[in-house]
Image: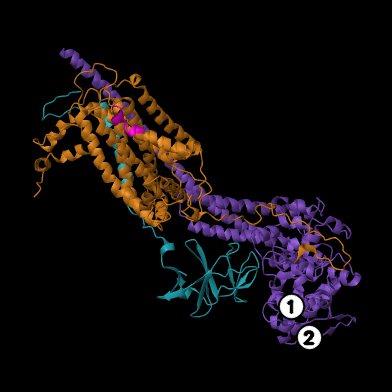
Chain colours: A purple, B cyan, C orange
Amino acid sequence: MRTAALTAVLTAVLAAAPAAGGPTSVRPAGRVVETLRARVPGAAADTANGCLACHAAQRRAATEGVHAEHGVTCVSCHGGDPAAVTLPQGHSGHFVGKPDKVATAELCGSCHSDPDKMREYDLPTGQLAQFRSSQHGQLLFGQHNKDVPTCTDCHGTHIIYPPYDARSRVYPTNIPGTCASCHSDPKLMAKYHIRTDQFAQFRNSAHGVALFQDQNFAAPTCVGCHGAHSELPPTVTEIASVCGRCHVLVEQEFAKGPHGAAARAGNLPGCLACHSNHGTERVPADSISATCNRCHSSNSQVHQLAVDIQRRVVQATSDIQSAERAIDQMSAAGERVGYYRFRYKAGLTYFREIAQKQHRLNLDTLDDLARRVRSVSIDLDSRAKATQEGRGEHRLLLLPVWFLSLSAVALALLALRGLRKTSRDSDSSET
Amino acid sequence: MDTNPQAGAPIWKPTFGEYVLAGSLGLLLVGALFAVVLYLIPSGPLQLEELQPAYQVAPETSFPVNSSRIINWGDQVILVVRTGDQSYSALQGTAPTDGCILSWNETSLRIVSPCTHLVYDLRGNVVRGLSTIPLQRYPVFIRDGIVYVARP
Amino acid sequence: MAPRDPKAARQWFARLWADLKASTDASLLVILRFVGLLYGPIDTRLSIGAAFRKALRHRLSPEAGWRQAFGGIAYLLFIILVVTGVLLSFYYRPSAQEAYQSIQHIVSGVSFGWLMRDLHVWAANLVVLVALLHMARVFFGAAYKPPRETNWIVGVLLLFSVFAFGATGYLLPWDQWSYWTVTEGLDILGRTPVVGGGLVRVLRADPIVSGATLSRFFAIHVIVLPWLVLGLLALHFALVRKHGVAPRVRAHQPNGTGVPFFPYHFLRMVVAGTLVVAVALTAALLFPRPVAAPANPAQPPGMLFSTWILADVSRALIYYLGGWGFGAFLLLGAGMVLLPIFDRSPERRLRRRPIVAALGVLFFLTFAAAWGAGRRLRSIPTATSGELTPFQRQPTGATPGAPLPHIAPAQRPAETGSDTTNPGGAP
């Protein structure tokens, strides 16, 4: 009885609504995917979206998420009759049901790859094409592999948040977790012989720490290096360019040096020769030559170069640290250190340049920079030493002070004793 | 020692030891006075340039067009660029991300960092690089042919 | 009109000097006596020279001996503090923007500036020590008994003034140690029941320690307290003169009628004074007070170093005995202060007044122990005023591998025969 009344109300409401329906597009492969654009102004109310009468779990999706805000409702993707609240009618009319992964990708693409539809939102339309070119896409479209993700696996099925919304699974700090939900699953990855330690390594890396702890979104997430929809691991010759998208100066210097030539020829995996791909560790200054020895034999010219480079980098590091200590010392002694801090900043600039320029593996440029750092640190160290010596000289004052004081005290005590003796003598002589 | 209580006579006649005692005490006192007098003589008043309203950069004539200077005003490093006969730009001279001292590239008319890939324009906006923090701008004025940088 | 030949010149100068002396009144010397620099009474009927010599010949009580040295040493240290303080104020700038740099200038840019500053700091520490030693001597020698109760109270007020001097002066360098030690101190003071809040409001003049606080502390340190101490000292000396030096506890025959101030007691003063000045100078030369980083109200330093006795003592007490222990110690101190009210019996021997002796020993020993403990304790300041919780930034890459929330692989729903899977539980 109640359902009958509800049906009557819904029919009445919908009769007043503008005519639903839109074009049906036909995919070249012969499959018919229907996109029903049921434009319901504003948030879809329950009364206009009868699907929710049974599918109550999806109720929030009717009002939350970017699709709901723009009038994309259940029927837009699933088809069916939004007016009906009982079963036979509900699933009538181009009802698609739960599309499989391939169908989902093409369903999403039916709008999101259509420039005419995306123009008003200024959204890019290349995602589906990129996805087809990616490893996930090749497996999905080529082999109908169900292990790979489709659009909804990363972006969400019903409530879809834009990537800049922190609730989205593709928000920068959430992306690694989203990728890791499959790529850290050993059983799943064992089938494809893919490692599962990337997420753990990434979390501990400089990029991971910058992303998760500092909330620094300049740091790359998985999609930053692998691509968001076109994900493929970079090839050997591509690695330097990928890292070089952000580490521009490093890549420029790298390309000018012997390692750059080797990487272009495919003999060297670019940056991965010394830094790991997900852990992205910095090579500590004192293990530079050990890193070189991973590939180069220890009695070669290259080894000598490695030792020289390491020596200069280690020396520069200790120089800049001693310069900083010198400034602290001078400041504690009360010197006004404004100018020295400026010199230190200049030295620090040269020191930071070393981190870039050393990738060229050229000793002359490195020498030049290390020498500049050294001159700054010598300057500051000598000033600090002069200050300390000045302070030390002050202690020389102790000598005359104690000499005079002790002699005065001794003489006064002697005089006192003399006085007491004479007074006793005079007392005894008086009595 | 004579402790003659008569009013007019000297109260005591010092022995040699007492002369020496007086001498050492006197030396200590003289030393203290010496220190105090040197302390009080002003050597040059304390000028706190970071509290001044402006900083003197250079005379106009020694500042060629399309050149730049780095100045250190208190604890701020400022890059001053002369872009034309009458136009100057003064910007924060250290990159906000890592503190490297920036330099002016005459050919590309941009401010670059030697340590990382950061490119700024003359308004201090980020043109290239992984930073969204612009550079602090400082006003520049010229008085009596000398270029000054004022507080932002 | 000066005559030509040397003999006539000398006679002219001698006559000039005699005339000057005759035109001066001996009551000028009363001022010196008022501030305790002259011991004997001034006979204003005489000329100034004769009055001076008569005052020097004044015979002190035979009880006066080395025991009484501590008071005089404390006074000498106070004079050193006044002199160095005035000299420092020639260069110090009491504003929040310039204070730190002016201290830097004093220490590194002015001849012997470092000496004046370090001497001032060390004399401040020593004066607290010596004043407490003086107090201990008076306490254990029962010199606070009638008729000397008022003098005891005046002495205790002087002690508090010395504490106030140190507390206000501690802020003036305006570096991180000064700023945060004073912030902590004021926060603790503010927790005193009833009066704490109002007192701290008046002292701090701002919700946080700022330039307004600096101005207030400078005024108190340089104007209010010196006048107060001058008055108290004059009263203290007058009372000692009136009631005389307290006799020794163990009855003994005093030798003779006492010796004149000059040369006997003067020589003793020379001995004590020279040694004190030498010790203070040595401390100042060997252990200079460093200049910490400039005060930063937003960021407490990693470690707080204090260079003042009371800061060490209070920190150790609070750390080891907690707030209640600190309060108990303060109560003990208050008991010491009000001692003459409670202990009015004429009994002066230590053995016969065990409670009082125990109190005294407890107080002074605790003080000494707390000072030693406080020097070894380094305090990490907590932001007791919630608004100043510092924002701790982890430097990038400094702690790789810091624990992050564990992200488990998503639950895979069981295969139901449909083509789709929905990992991640997206609604």
The residue lying toward the viewer, choosing from C156 and A307, is C156
Of callouts 2 and 1, which one flags the residue occurring earlier in the amino acid sequence?
A: 1
Image quarter (top left, top right, bottom left or bottom right) of the N terminus of chain A: bottom right
Q: Position of residue C184 (x, y in %)?
A: 45, 47
Name the amino acid type tagged 2.
Gly
- x and y percentages locating residue B131 in the rendered image: 62, 68
Crowd class of label 1 (few under 14; some 14 to 19; many from 20; radius 10 Å) = few
Q: Quadrant of the C terminus of chain A?
A: top left
Q: Nearer the viewer, residue C91 or A126?
A: A126
| Residue B59 shows in this picture | yes
Q: Looking at the image, is A115 positioned above or below residue A195?
A: below
Q: Image point 41% across, 48% down: which residue?
A: C190
- Image: A333 above or below C62: below
Span of residues in magenta: C335-343
Q: Tell me the subunit letter for badge 1.
A: A
- Dot 2 and dot 1 residues touching (CB under 8 Å): no
| Number of numbered discs overlaid on the protein picture | 2
Q: From what the image shows, is residue C160 above or below residue A124? A: above
Say what secondary structure mark 1 lies in.
helix
* Mark carried by residue B116: none
The residue under the point 86% across, 73% down is A102
Residue A19, horizontal then vertical, whole percent: 75, 87
Any magenta on residue C337?
yes
Q: Secondary structure at mark 2?
A: loop
- Is A209 part of what is drawn in magenta? no
Of tags 2 and 1, the one toward the viewer is 1
Q: Which mark is residue A5?
A: 1
- Quarter where residue A185 is shown: bottom right
- Residue assigned mark 2: A22
Decide whether the magenta segment is chiefly helix, strand or loop: helix
Q: Image height check: is C206 above or below B138?
A: above
Question: Can I make out residue A400 in this image?
Answer: no
